[in-house]
Image (spheres, rainbow, N blue to C red):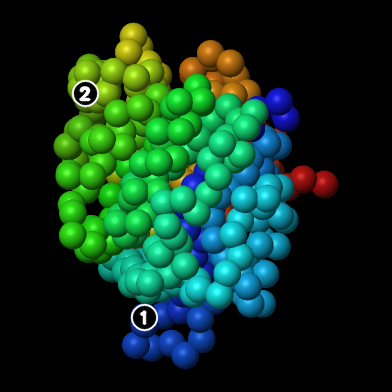
Amino acid sequence: MKEHKIITLGEVLMRLSPIRNKRFGQSNEYESFFGGAELNVAASLGNFGLNVSMATVLPSHEIGKEALNYLKRYDVNTTHVIRNNDRLGIYFTEAASMQRGGKVIYDRAFSGFSQLAIDSFDWNDIFQDATWFHWSGITPAVSKNAALLTKVAIEKAYEKGLRISMDYNYRSKLWQWGKSHEEVMPELMEKCHVMSGIHPDVDLLKEEVSDLDFALSGQDMMNKYPHCKVVVFSSRGVISANHHTWQGVLYDGKKVYRSKQYQLTHIVDRIGGGDAFMAGVIYGLHEYEGNLQSCIDFATAASALKHGIDGDFNAITKEEVVQMITSDNGSKVER
């Protein structure tokens, strides 16, 4: 699989979370994790054995060095990581519990990534011999500079014939720099081949979504963006903060492929679940070479397992994902 070369672009963040389900006003102890949508995807792909590189910026101080080591630990190539004296973006998370929802507070204004100029990266060099480029809607939401940077990267990737995937990842708290996602995202999506879709608007706990519903939603995306060949949906039903149903769906313009539905009970950490899903889709499209049922089965199982992992990143091996798919519950002890 090393003949493939995948590139991601995005901001590396430090996540700070009160321990033991405490609220922000209760805790004076915080756990720290490195994360960010594109980092989470890249780390999963590297952990699964794919050749992946990330274009980003990190501070030159010790915490920046630790973030760099985090990337390397999961076999993410760091050749295209800029080091400078600007700040690292931060976000705080308060865990959900029972019927209480979670909360996210961003501290990303004037971070090093948000201030990058559009010519900060040499895309001809970065995309040399590359086959795939992945981005998410979080990056253009960060700042005008980041939106322009994303646009340049997509255009160069398309020019060089790379397959381009994107996850919409709408975050209302981030779109504050002067334009809305409706104004920015459509142009960026025009040259993309694999996209996360807009789930049909139903209550999954009360009614079933038919294959036709998914097909219509997927076909609408393909009609708007003719380069799109695959649309994927993560289908979540929320019973409580700690108990969700979870299913993946893929549409290729001809057929709807569904994974099994998982009951995610006693959830440890749902943050990064969508990134684990997108990483699983990208891995599946590389590994299974046209077997789209196996692709969506892998992506859904990988993201289901993420819900039992602390932190942003899905610290799961591909062998554990396959075991999850092929066994009844995937929870046996490895001896």
Q: Callout 1: helix, strand or loop?
A: loop
- Can you name the residue that lies furthest to the right here? 335
Residue 265, visible in the rendered structure = no
* Camera-side residue of 166 and 295: 166
Q: Where is residue 271 in the image (x, y as percent from the top left)?
A: 44, 57
Q: Mark 2 or 1 closer to N-term?
A: 1
Where on the picture, by quarter, is residue 154? top left
Q: Position of residue 98 (x, y in %)?
A: 33, 65
Q: What amino acid type is highlighted by mark number 2?
A: Lys
Q: Callout 1 environment at 10 Å: few (<14), some (14 to 19), or many (20+)?
A: some
* Camera-side residue of 307 and 191: 191
Residue placed under numbered mark 2 in the picture: 224
Q: How many marks?
A: 2
Q: State the residue at coordinates (32%, 42%).
A: 168
Residue placed under numbered mark 1 in the picture: 23
Where on the picture, by quarter, is residue 92? bottom left
